[in-house]
């Protein structure tokens, strides 16, 4: 059973904004001759890496809602220019919308057991691009989505 991470998507106002950021990073990587993965750097190294890399994802909290996920492809330990140890989460290029789930603010990241993870909002190939984010949020608060 996979294990996941939850992280606040600080500075991001919507799933579309997250998708734009991921697409921009993918284009930069492709231009540099690299794989189109996005990365996220954090301070702490997860101790349960094997479970995370066995089908886990990074779930993003956007505006107080667990809203989207990206598959975890790799976790790399490195030292930054200031000599401080860091962790690079290598993420798949696809941002998958999930059933919105309220989440209070927290620092860093948290583990999320597979049984507690929200399911994907749409099946592969479907999209909610026509449904406004505010409408999705209201439907989720009413328990209709």
Image (tube, rainbow, N blue to C red):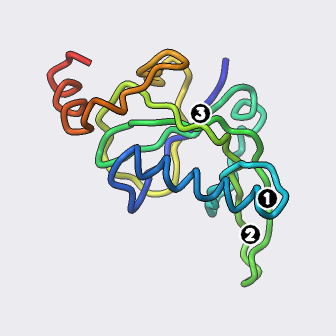
Q: Name the element at disc 1.
A: strand
Could you say where residue 108 lies in the image, as x and y percent from the top left? 50, 56
Residue, x 65% and y 30% (percent of image)?
Answer: 56
Is residue 50 positioned above or below 21 on the image? above
Q: Residue furthest bottom?
A: 82
Residue, x 16% and y 31% (percent of image)?
Answer: 138
Instruction: Please tell me how crowded label 2 is: few (under 14), some (14-19), or many (20+) other residues with Cα within 10 Å.
Output: some
- For the C terminus, give its image quadrant: top left
Q: Which residue is mark 1?
A: 77
**Residue 101 vs residue 111: left or right?**
left
Q: Name the element at disc 3.
A: strand
Q: Which residue is mark 3?
A: 4
**Marks 3 and 1, Cα distance to the nearest angstrom?**
18 Å
Could you say where residue 134 lies in the image, as x and y percent from the top left? 20, 38
**Marks 1 and 2, Cα distance to the nearest angstrom?**
7 Å
Residue, x 67% and y 40% (percent of image)?
Answer: 92
**Marks 2 and 3, Cα distance to the nearest angstrom?**
22 Å
Q: Which residue is mark 2?
A: 85
Could you say where residue 116 lies in the image, as x and y percent from the top left? 46, 22
6 or 136, which lies in front? 136
């Amino acid at each position: 059973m996979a294990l996941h991470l939850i992280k606040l998507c600080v500075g991001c106002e919507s799933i579309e904004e997250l998708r734009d950021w991921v697409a921009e990073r993918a284009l930069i990587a492709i231009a540099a001759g690299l794989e189109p993965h996005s990365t996220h750097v954090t301070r702490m190294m997860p101790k349960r890496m094997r479970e995370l890399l066995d089908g886990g994802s990074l779930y993003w909290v956007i505006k107080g809602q667990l809203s989207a996920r990206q598959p975890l492809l790799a976790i790399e330990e490195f030292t930054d220019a200031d000599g401080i140890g860091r962790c690079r989460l290598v993420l798949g290029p696809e941002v998958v919308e999930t059933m919105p789930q309220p989440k209070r603010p927290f620092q860093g990241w948290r583990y999320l057991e597979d049984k507690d993870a929200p399911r994907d909002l749409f099946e592969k190939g479907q999209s909610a691009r026509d449904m406004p984010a505010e409408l999705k949020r209201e439907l989720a608060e009413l328990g209709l989505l």
